[in-house]
Image (tube, helix red, strand yellow):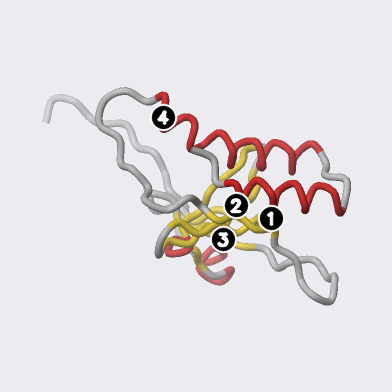
Amino acid sequence: MVDVELAKKARQILSQRKPDAHQIQVQKMAYEMPRSVQKATGQVDVVSVTPIIEPLSRPDGKPLLAIYWETGDGRILGPATPEFQAKTGNQFWIVTTFQGHIRWIDADRLRSKKSFETQRAIHEVELIRGF
C-alpha cells in the first residue's frame, strides 16, 4: 500500500522545483520500497509505519555539512552530503549518495569527522596455513 499523503507531498515537492535525475532515483526508490516488501517471499520484517521522507536543506540556503558513518566492519566512511531524512517508527535515517551509490544510513551509525580522520587503516592479511 502506498501512503497517499506521502505521494501528495512528493508531488508537491516535484512541482515546486525541477528535480535532477538523482532526486528522481531516490524518490522512486522510496516509492518502490513498500512494493518490494509486498513481492518478497519467505520471512520479512514488516515496518508498521510508512517511512516519512523529507528533503534536507538549511534555511539560509548554505550547503549542508558533510556526514561520516561507521560500517558493519568498523570502517568510518565519508564525507557525503545528506540529501533526505527518513523516519520509520522511532528510527531515523539519512539518505545520501556516496561513491555513486544511494545509501540509507541509520542515524545511530553517524560519526564525527575527527573519528574519520583518526581511524586506523584496515589491512587485510593472508592466513598462514600449517600452524
**Element type where label 1 sits in the image:** strand
Asked if labels 3 and 4 touch by Cβ distance under 8 angstroms, the answer is no
Q: Quadrant of residue 80?
A: bottom right
Helix, strand or loop status at disc 3: strand
In the rendered structure, the answer to whether residue 44 lies left or right of residue 63 reads left
Q: In the structure shown, which secondary structural element does the residue marked by tag 4 occupy?
A: helix
How far is mark 3 from mark 2, CA to CA? Answer: 12 Å
According to the image, label 1 marks what residue?
A: 83
Q: Work out whether mark 2 precedes mark 4 in sequence or the reverse, and give the earlier one.
A: 4
Residue plotted at (53% across, 48% down): 104
Image coordinates for residue 15, horizontal then vertical, percent: 85, 48
In the image as oriented, which residue stretches furthest toward the bottom?
60
Amino acid carrying mark 2 in the image: Val
Which residue is drawn at the image coordinates 62% and 38% (left, top)?
Answer: 101
Nearer to us: label 1 or label 3: 1
* Mark 1 or mark 3: whose residue is earlier in sequence: 3
Crowding around mark 3 (Cα neighbors within 10 Å: few <14, some 14 to 19, many 20+) is: many
In the rendered image, the vertical position of residue 113 relative to residue 33, given as above or below:
below
Tell me if 18 is positioned left or right of 26 in this view: right
- Residue designated by label 2: 95
Q: Earlier in the sequence, mark 2 or mark 1?
A: 1
Distance Cα–Cα, label 1 vs label 3: 14 Å
Tell me the CA gap for discs 2 and 1: 6 Å
Q: Which mark identifies residue 38?
A: 4
Residue 99, numbered label:
none
Mark closer to the chain start, 3 or 2: 3
Give the residue pinned by disc 3: 68
Which residue is situated farthest in the left direction here?
A: 131
Q: Is residue 112 above or below residue 30?
A: below
Q: CA distance from mark 4 to mark 3?
A: 32 Å
Asked if marks 2 and 1 touch (Cβ < 8 Å), the reply is yes
